[in-house]
Amino acid sequence: MFQSFRWVQSMVGEEYGKVQAWGSHPKGMGDLAKASPCQYLDLPQSYLEPIIVRYASSRGFQFRFSTQLVDIEEIPESSDSLCTIRDRISHHEFQVRAKYVFGADGSRSKVAQILGLNYNVEPREGVACNVLFKADIGHLIPRERYAGLHSIILTESFLGMVPIMRLIRPWNQWILVCNFAKEDPRWKDINRESPELIKLIQQAIGDSSVKVEVERLDPWTVNEAVAEKYSVEGKNIFILGDAAHRHPPAHANGSNTCVQDAYNLAWKVAYVAKGLAGPKLLESYSAERQPVGATLVREANQQMWSHAEVWKALGQFSATPEEGVQRLAKLSEPTLEGDEVRQALHDALEEKRRESENLGFSMNQWYDSSAVYLEDEKEPRPALKGDPVVDILISTYPGNRLPHAWLDVVTRRKLISTHDLAGHGAFTLFIGHRGEAWRKAAAKISETTGIPINTYGIGFGLDYIDVYRDWFKSREVGEDGCVLVRPDRFVAWRSKSMVSEAEDKLQQVFNSILSRDGLQ
């Protein structure tokens, strides 16, 4: 319903362009169905975080708000850390001894500062401010105007600034993201009660009679920075999320990437803490996630400046308001100059369409580290055919995301994805006909080591049937082969056929990817 991005005079005014986004384009719909059992969900951070906190706290995790990390000290002859914490209300300081420290503390990360981590930084001048406000405007927006984002073109009233309206809660809570190419003195003294801010919001809506209540202003700068490493060797201290990678919201992959960082790190920490893996496994976190963060930072900034090409085509960056109005008028003119303006707008929107159909960018991550076993691969990783931002690569090549395929029991009453069979804190082994030796090997290794391994046979007469034959097409191993999947649903290793000593081979793989030679 809201899976599109539009450029408009106002929420009720003329529309200059629109792109289908986030799985709504016909090709994107098909690719998403191939890649995942899930649909897109636009859930703002202000609503996502309470859900996560409630879930975690109900499972024994404790939360302290209004609390500040002051310092982290090393404890001699130990990998533990002594953290000094300050209660910002009472100003009381206390210390916590921590076996692990996870710095998910944002772009001003104290943890990264204490560790002395270096960042690859590209200077950027762009600044912005998020204006959270309430305004009941559902009666002004027919279904044809539904979109996730609305870029408002106000050449007459606020030249050089581009506001983007984002729906938070239908139809009375919104964010107006005000984007500037550089610091703008007109915005310097703006606050929640500023009449000019209320007027700007009403102009963006297109109705001066709408009652507007500004709740909060959050200024931010356009960053292009990524940590060179997400941890320091020999320390059980890690950074993740915005502490590791800082970028504008283009590509809409910020929160996704933050969660992926945690998802990658959590199972590794759990396995090391339980004595199932050696400490060296934790080094694979930075090796795997830093390249993903670096790519996101680069692409998000590139797309941020691609936004500017649309705004430029629509006159928002003209020298004067009058020139901006004239530029917009040329869109309707049957002249050669009008042709040029329309072509410029078309080209700019096509680049934004690429960003809005960025399923490949979200799904094509792959890992190359000690936590992936590649020694049995005779060929290099398969190359993606097409645009890596838009198109998807589905493969069981080790280091790639587990392919999605719909499975079911024979009596057809338990439809489930391969993604849902995998995970849950355990390794997963997928086998076919003539793969029973792999099942027995996994069971024996699990029994002797304690490593949780769930084994599933896929095929006629096995645990699950391959409903649409998608697993058969994507598994890339024979009926006597197997695919081993990590707890984070990335392929750890595969064997294309049976080997003479299945248990020895599988044990060798686990010893390697879990760095078990480091177990004491």
Image (cartoon, helix red, strand yellow):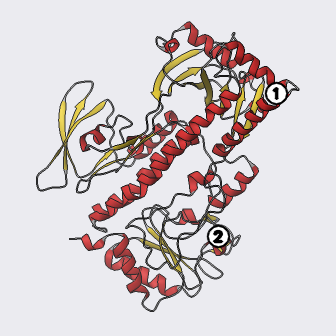
- Give the left or right position of residue 369, taking residue 314 as reference: left
Above or below residue 26? Residue 347 is: above
Gap in Å between the C-alphas at discs 1 and 2? 57 Å
Q: Residue 273 at x, y = what percent?
A: 28, 61
* Residue position for label 1: 338
Rendered-image quadrant of the N terminus: top right
Q: Furthest residue to the front?
A: 336
Q: Residue 72 at x, y = what percent?
A: 20, 42
Kindly tell me whether residue 247 is visible in this rendering. yes
- Is mark 1 in CB contact (under 8 Å) with mark 2? no
Q: In the image, what residue type sits under mark 2? A: Asp
Label 1 Cα neighbours within 10 Å, binned few <14 / some 14-19 / many ≥20: some
Q: Residue 343 at x, y = what percent?
A: 77, 35
Q: Residue 247 at x, y = what percent?
A: 48, 38
Rendered-image quadrant of the C terminus: bottom left
Q: In the image, what residue type sits under mark 1? A: Gly
Residue 70: quarter of image: top left
Q: Nearer the viewer, residue 502 or 423?
A: 502
Q: Nearer the viewer, residue 321 or 60?
A: 321
- Residue at the location (54% across, 41% down)? 300
What numbered label is drawn on residue 408? 2
